[in-house]
Each structure stands twice: as structure tokens, then as C-alpha cells.
Amino acid sequence: MNALANMAAEVPENPLVPPIPELVIGLIAFFIVFGFLAKKFLPNINKVLEERRKQIEGRIEEAEATQAEAQQVLADYRAQLADARHEAARLRQEAQEQGATLIAEMRAEGQRQREEIIAAGHAQIEADRKQAALSLRQDVGKLATELAGKLVGESLEDVARQSRTIDRFLDEVEAKAASDTTKAEAGR
């Protein structure tokens, strides 16, 4: 054994490998401390971890509830927006219909006023035509009487006779003009 002890004395000790008795004592101490920690602190650690897990789960549930509420609010907002757009389209349609009705009423009123103006214009033209015809008849009568007086050589101053002669002459001229117009229309 001496040789073994000599060899052991000759081989230097490895600083990384501890001696066996120290290793056994260290392991026993480690298991005692580990057992003490496992009995004393591990339940507290597990309790804290469980509380954190519950808090996280509670926050996740709150977040899901908040998200569901936000989705509901968003859906309500979109529904209100769609209703508002529908209402705006309806109001726009009503305004267009009212505008079209107003335009039609204004056109009808304009047409009525135009017809009144045209009718008044025709009445005025007819009155002016009659006045001009009467004035022309009187002027033609005077001129015809003066001319006839100059041709005959005596004065035709009798107004009643003059008026009857002029009227008869003009009636014959108008009758001849009316028959010529009727013949021309029949020829077409």
C-alpha cells in the first residue's frame, strides 16, 4: 500500500475534483437546504405564481369583454352611419322631387303667363287692326268723296249719303276679297 500512497503522494491533487468526504458533506448540506427551501418557500412561490396566473387570466377576460364591447359599439356606429346615409339619400331624393315639382310649376306658370301675354297681344293687335281699318275707311271715304266731287264737279257734302256710299263700296270690296281668298284656299 505503500506504493499506492507513494503514487498518491506523487500525483498532485486536481483542484477541480473535490475530495470525496467534502463532496458527500456538500451534497447532504445541499439536500437539507433544498428540502428546507422546498418546504418553506416553494408553497409561497407557487401561491404567488397562481395569483399572477389568475390576474393574467382575469385581465385577459376583461380584455376580451372590452374587445367584445368595442365590437358592439363599432357595429352600432356602423348601423347609425348606414342609417344616416340612408336618411341623407332620402332627403336628397325628396329635395330632387321637390325641385322637379317646383320647376314643373314654374314652367306651367310661365306657359300660362306666356299664353296670357300672347292673348293680350292678339287682342291688342285685333283692336289696333279694327282701329286702323276704321281710320282707313274714313280716310278712304274722304278721299273718295273729294275725288268723286272733283270728277262730278259738284260738292258731295251730304254726310249721310256720303257714309252710305262709302260703306256700300267698301262692303263690295271686302266681299270680293273674301271670295278671292275662299277660291284660293279651295284651290290648294
Image: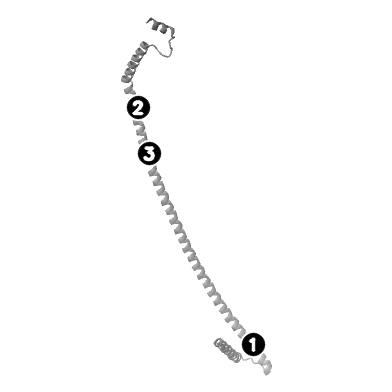
Front of the two marks 3 and 1: 3
Above or below 106: residue 153: below
- Whichever of callouts 3 and 1 sits on the residue coming sooner in the sequence is 3
* Spatial CA span between label 1 and label 2: 135 Å
Residue ID at (34%, 26%): 48
Q: How is the image coloured?
A: one colour
Q: Label 1 neighbourhood size at 10 Å, few (<14), some (14-19), many (20+)? A: some
Above or below 77: residue 90: below
* Spatial CA span between label 3 and label 1: 111 Å
In terms of secondary structure, where does tag 3 sit?
helix
In terms of secondary structure, where does tag 2 sit?
helix
Q: Amino acid at mark 2?
A: Leu
Question: Is 67 placed left or right of 138 in the picture?
Answer: left
* Residue under pointer 1: 142
Quadrant occupied by the N terminus = top left
Measured as percent of width and height from the top left, residue 62 is found at 36, 36
Question: Is 88 placed left or right of 25 in the picture?
Answer: right
